[in-house]
Image (cartoon, grey):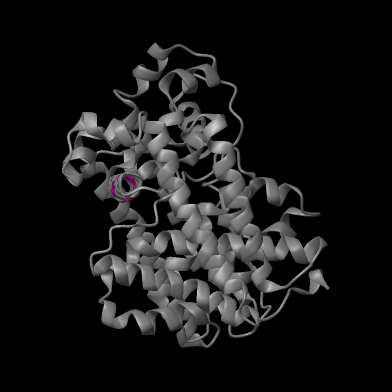
Amino acid sequence: MSAADGNSAERVSGETARFGKRRDEVIHAASTLINAVGVKGMTFAELAQAVGLNATSITYYFDRKDKLVCAVYEETLDWLEQAASIAAAEPNPAARVRSFIHAHFALRQRVREGEKGLVTALSEIRTLEEDAQEPLLAHYARIIDIVRGFFGKDRTGMRRSLDTARAHVLMEAMFWLPVWTEQYSTRDFDRVEARLSDIFAHGLSVRPGDWHPAALDNRAWRTGDTADSDTLDAFMRAATEMINQRGYRGASVNRIAAELNVTKGSFYHHHEAKDDLVADCFTRSYDRLSAIQLAAVRAPANGWGRIASALAEAIDLQFRDPMPLLRTAALQALPEEARDNVVLRANRLAMRFAGMLADGIADGSVRPVDQILASHVLMPALNAAYEARKWAGRQSDPAIAVKLYAWVLCAGFSCDPPEVG
């Protein structure tokens, strides 16, 4: 090869490296914006400003926004798969879960120190076109399969169902971790990480397997079928279901109206804008979860029995009620003021769970865990139970489905419920 050829190859190599570096910067900046304002709120103009380019230059790396969004999600999924695969090589379930949790805390540490690559909230994958979302969902399914393997190899039947639930709850807790760890100094990360790992290993109940939830008397949070489609309740139910399935962007006014077989005018009779409807859906969801908590607090049981009763009722509602609780996937798309109000309400519900846990610790029915951390496990587990509806429908009995899903909260992964055998 001549010197000229060598120089040409070096130039091509250098240009390729610069292109790759700049492309990564665009992906990382887009990840930050999606986490802050959602896919809809992320614009090429803001993105260009974040990386020191003009909006037209962004199209040199990604000619369409949906391609960029897919690249952002793929980077997150690649990171999750790597963290799960490293953890899977550990010798036992406790070490595997500790490794996986540690990877997330280590990432948060690096982000605090200035690293730009972020784990992106995956909540809006279902808003993409089917041909774009299918490979992403298949990738996520592979990760769940690896995490399910943390708890045992080649388990089948009900054991596999139990491990699927454990993997789902663990993954959801990790997705919420970037939000609540902002309240902690990085100097406390080692302690927080250890306490969180302990909750997953051993659960919350002092007696592993103590799962005897009481039937709660007040059923005001349950919804029934309504024959009249042109009512506020009908719109809220249709919007909640559609947002949970398709995300905020996918739940258009046209689709909500078509689902109810009414006109767009009927929609605007009840709400001035879609954001108003979403805010009302969050309010209704939190009102219902609050009612469940308060009914459980009044139940004639010890602290853990009351928590188990609230968990059982809320999980069953997510699995079977015609109107589930609204997933937090819609939160990013709300205006900042409305979003702040929703977050405040969610934090208050989490604090109520923390108080119930403190009562259980005081009466000896709950293990001496960090109540605040435990509430950060309970809230995402309940929020994400809707995503396990199909899984729940495959179980032999609704009560068994609830028990399997709640088992990691009750007893961790240190033992299996008797039904599993």
Q: Position of residue 411 (x, y in %)?
A: 63, 77
Left or right placement of residue 57 versus residue 413 in this view: left
Q: Give whichever of 34, 62 is nearer the camera.
A: 62
Left or right placement of residue 225 versus residue 276 in this view: right
Q: Position of residue 274 (x, y in %)?
A: 35, 27
- Residue 389 within the magenta-colored segment of the rendering: no
Is residue 28 in sight in this rendering? no
Q: Quadrant of the C terminus?
A: bottom right
Residue furthest toward the front? 2
| 135 versus 315 height, above or below | above
The residue positioned 77% from the left and 54% from the top of the image is 395
Left or right placement of residue 283 versus residue 147 in this view: left
The residue positioned 58% from the left and 27% from the top of the image is 226
Q: Give whichever of 73, 13 is nearer the camera.
A: 13
Q: Position of residue 60 (x, y in %)?
A: 30, 32
| 349 versus 354 height, above or below | above
- Residue 16 within the magenta-colored segment of the rendering: yes
| 380 versus 269 height, above or below | below
Q: In which quadrant of the rendered view does residue 302 lie?
A: bottom right
Is residue 100 in sight in this rendering? yes
The residue positioned 58% from the left and 44% from the top of the image is 137
Q: Which residues are magenta?
A: 15-19
Q: Position of residue 126 (x, y in %)?
A: 51, 37
Examine the residues drawn in magenta and state their main secondary structure.
helix
